[in-house]
Image: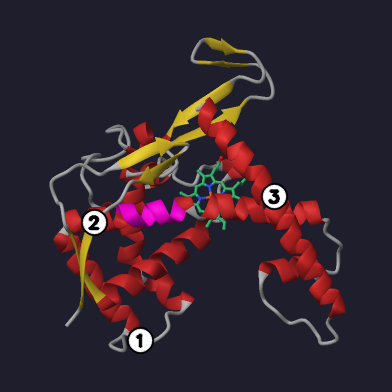
Amino acid sequence: MRETRNRLLSNKTGASTNLLKIIEERRTQIEKSNEKIDSNDLLTKFLTANEKISDDDIRATIMDLLLGGTLTTVNTLSAIVYYLGHNPKVQKRMVQELDDVLGSDRDSSITIDQVTRLEYTDAIFKEASRLFPTIPVNVRTNAEPNEIAGYKFPAKTQFLIDVERIHRSPDYWTDPDTFNPDRWLNKSDTKMYSSYYQFGGGARECPGKKMALAEVKTLIALLYRNYDIELVDKVSPFNYKYDLIKMVQGLEIKIKPRN
Ligand code: HEM
């Protein structure tokens, strides 16, 4: 853990320096430009905001988005491909939903309204990330001393929340080890919903939650509406490493255009 932390911190310094350079370059470009800047990218939005934001705040925000929003989504996407590969009936039903909601023109762009209507695909996202939470442990520190279940904890104790265990506990889930997206279609099961902790919770809950769902569902739709996808190896266990985030170590697939 300490080794990983040190490696990440040393990479972070390099990435921060590069980001500051990019911010400076873009600022100069904007200042020198005689035309009205109407670019929609995030950096330009920050630099042209009415309220001045310091370069370091811009850097920190972009860094948060890059670190928080890439490995999490890409590994969740891999988990979905893995579970669909093992559950061809679920895959078939999902592809049917994609055809129903997105229509027969497989080259058409996908709108956010359509993505919202992909309810079964949404259930697949939740179910795959329940069984394979890319962030399986969440951390909290208490500001004041606490007593929980008869145990006394001084202030600044670090608590590790075992998300993976909660996600597979028979106290909250029926057949916890079974991949069953249908369980998510019963929206009234509040006990189950409040035991899904993939995006954390409370004041520090992942601010990218909706974006992650939209992003991954769109990627799934783009892939599966156009291609038949199968796993090459349906026998070996899912190959991943846990290094702060669960990182899939390669997932071979057979991919061919759909008829
Ligand atoms: C499947 C994808 C994602 C997963 C599983 C995920 C998961 C998480 C988790 C567990 C936390 C900690 C929450 C807590 O402590 O309660 C978090 C925080 C955060 N996430 Fe995500 N995330 C995902 C996608 C994204 C995306 C797409 C973005 C932004 C583009 C993002 C930005 C952030 C940021 C900035 C934080 C820190 C929030 C804070 O400390 O207040 N995440 N995420």
Q: Which residues are magenta?
A: 72-79
Mark 1 or 3: the one toward you: 3
Mark 1 and mark 3: Cα distance apart in space:
38 Å
Mark 1 and mark 2: Cα distance apart in space:
26 Å
Mark 1 or 2: the one toward you: 2
Q: Quadrant of residue 125?
A: bottom left
Residue placed most toward the observer, 236 or 191: 236
Q: On residue 16, which mark appears?
A: 3
Q: Amino acid at mark 1?
A: Asp
Residue depicted at 42% across the width and 56% down the height? 74
Q: Which residue is mark 2?
A: 252
Q: Amino acid at mark 3?
A: Ser
Q: Amino acid at mark 2?
A: Glu
Q: Residues within 10 Å of mark 3 (few under 14, many from 20)?
A: some
Q: Are marks 1 and 3 in contact (CB under 8 Å)?
A: no
Give the side of residue 103 with respect to residue 84, left or right. right
Residue depicted at 22% across the width and 74% down the height? 96
SS assignment at label 1: loop
Marks 1 and 2, the one that precedes in the sequence: 1
Q: Is residue 179 magenta?
A: no
Q: Is residue 75 magenta?
A: yes
